[in-house]
Amino acid sequence: MEPQAVNTLVVEAESLKVSVLNQLNGSGARELKHLFNETSLFFQEEVLAQWRIQERYDELIDYILYQYEEHGGESFWSQVLLDLRLKKDEVRAIRMLEGLLPKRLEKVKVCSKNLKKYPNNYLSAASLGIAKGGALKVLYEYAYILENKPADQIEEVKVNKVKTLIEKVIAT
């Protein structure tokens, strides 16, 4: 089920589109006409940028977890993660990373099984590499947050869990 943030994004993007079109007297410049097409994601991207500026992180995280739960979106979620780091908002950063991790780890398992079933299939091998990269990217960011603090504040149990997951993905 899609989160409310997705619906809010659509409503706000449509409102922004109408507002811009009205400011252009309803016609719009010929060079910008493509931005007003039904398939254009321009206004959604603008609203997401506004959410970052407005620090609407819970909605951003909900959107990210819905849109990029299994794969993709690294440039966007990495930027939101950087925002959270700069705000020292570890709770939200970890919520986002923990939300991104399960489906990526599952994808590694599926790709690994597929490669074992078809060991000579180079596409299966490449898919496993891509899946590992996606999972390791999230795990790296998670480890960075867990370990980038004074030694007396490091939670060894969580660090060891992430370390074990990294080793497991690499060995897959």
Image: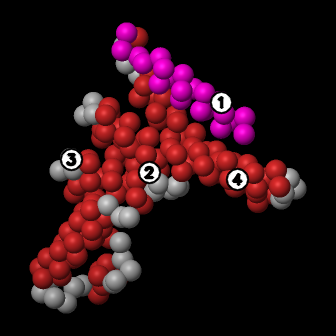
Q: Marks 4/1: CA distance? A: 17 Å
N-term mark: 1 or 3: 3
According to the image, what is the colour scheme of the structure? secondary structure
Magenta span: 152-172
Residue 125 placement (x, y as % from top left): 77, 52
Q: Is residue 170 magenta?
A: yes
Given the image, on which type of amino acid does mark 2 rest? Ser
Q: Are marks 3 and 2 in contact (CB under 8 Å)?
A: no
Q: Residue at x 59, y 32 (%)?
A: 165
Q: Residue at x 75, y 51 (%)?
A: 113
Q: Residue at x 37, y 9 (%)?
A: 152
Q: Marks 3/4: CA distance? A: 37 Å
Q: Secondary structure at mark 3?
A: loop
Residue under label 3, please give it: 55
Q: Is residue 121 magenta?
A: no
* Marker disc for residue 111: 4
